Amino acid sequence: QSALTQPRSVSGSPGQSVTISCTGTSSDVGGYNYVSWYQQHPGKAPKLMIYDVSKRPSGVPDRFSGSKSGNTASLTISGLQAEDESDYYCCSYAGSYTYYVFGTGTKVTVL
Amino acid sequence: EVQLVQSGTEVKKPGESLTISCKGSGYSFTSYWISWVRQMPGKGLEWMGRIDPTDSYTNYSPSFQGHFTISADKSVSTAYLLWSSLKASDTAMYYCARHSTPIAAAVSFDSWGQGTLLTVSS
């Protein structure tokens, strides 16, 4: 099972919007509405930002949003802030043999 | 407050055995599965396997099959990751993470341990 494909990096100025894609197959992203997104600051544990494609846990700012079309899920950060500079990983259920697969990770840089 | 607290940094030699731990608190430990996730230096997250603390039923990623064991002791609310013979390629940060739901497909990882750094070197 290969990792889901994410762009290596994206960047934007404060206040702008950035979107991170997460491309898989019909066996993972496209087959289930169970994509989650994680933020990981350097040296820290990952933090859940989005689950079930587009739901936000309590405490996550509403500038973070998720969506999915076909085999590609997306995380959009609107109104980019300096503290959003981090690594982001998607994750999808991939069936009862592989179970869970993460994306390759994307570094978000705030210019 | 839900917390997962992992054991500390380890430095081992190839061929040695090791157990690292993940202690849950602030919730009913047997109500949520625990997964282990590897992050090699400078690399991304990789799902290794999961355990149901109620009965210690486990599933492993096909990518890692056979090289380690996941166990749990519900009496002390702790999950474990065990190696019987470490390799240099096991050098990584290891995280435990709590499943958000007992439904396998609908899982997201809603709480994470702080990580255990393992270095394997001769």
Image (tube, rainbow, N blue to C red):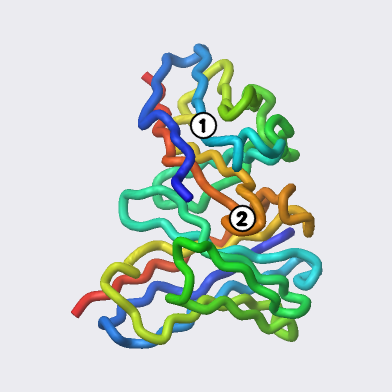
> Can residue A86 be seen at all in this image of the molecule?
no
Circle nearer the N terminus (1, 2): 1
Q: Please identify the quadrant where the N terminus of chain B is shown.
A: bottom right
Residue B24, by quadrant, is bottom right
Q: Secondary structure at mark 2?
A: loop
Q: Residue at x 50, y 18 (%)?
A: A18
Give left or right: position of B108 versus A89.
right
* Residues at circles 1 and 2 in contact by the CB criterion of under 8 Å: no
Viewer-side label of 1, 2: 2
Q: Residue at x 43, y 81 (%)?
A: B83
| Residue for badge 2 | A99
Residue B112, by quadrant, is bottom right
Above or below, comparing residue A15 to residue A27 in the picture: above
Badge 1 and badge 2 both on one subunit: yes
Above or below, comparing residue B11 to residue A99 in the picture: below
Image coords of residue A29 (percent x, y): 61, 36
Residue A32, by quadrant, is top right
Image coords of residue A100 (percent x, y): 59, 52
Image coords of residue B78 (percent x, y): 65, 78
**Residue A22 shows which numbered tag?**
1
Judging from the image, mark 1 belongs to the subunit labelled A
Q: Secondary structure at mark 1?
A: strand
Q: Few, some or many C-alpha atoms within 10 Å of disc 2 (few <14, some 14-19, many ≥20)? A: many
**Which residue of the protein is positioned furthest toward the left in this rendering?**
B122
> Can residue A90 be seen at all in this image of the molecule?
yes
Above or below, comparing residue B73 to residue A72 in the picture: below
Q: Please identify the quadrant where the C terminus of chain B is shown.
A: bottom left
Image coords of residue B114 (percent x, y): 52, 61
Q: Amino acid at mark 1?
A: Cys
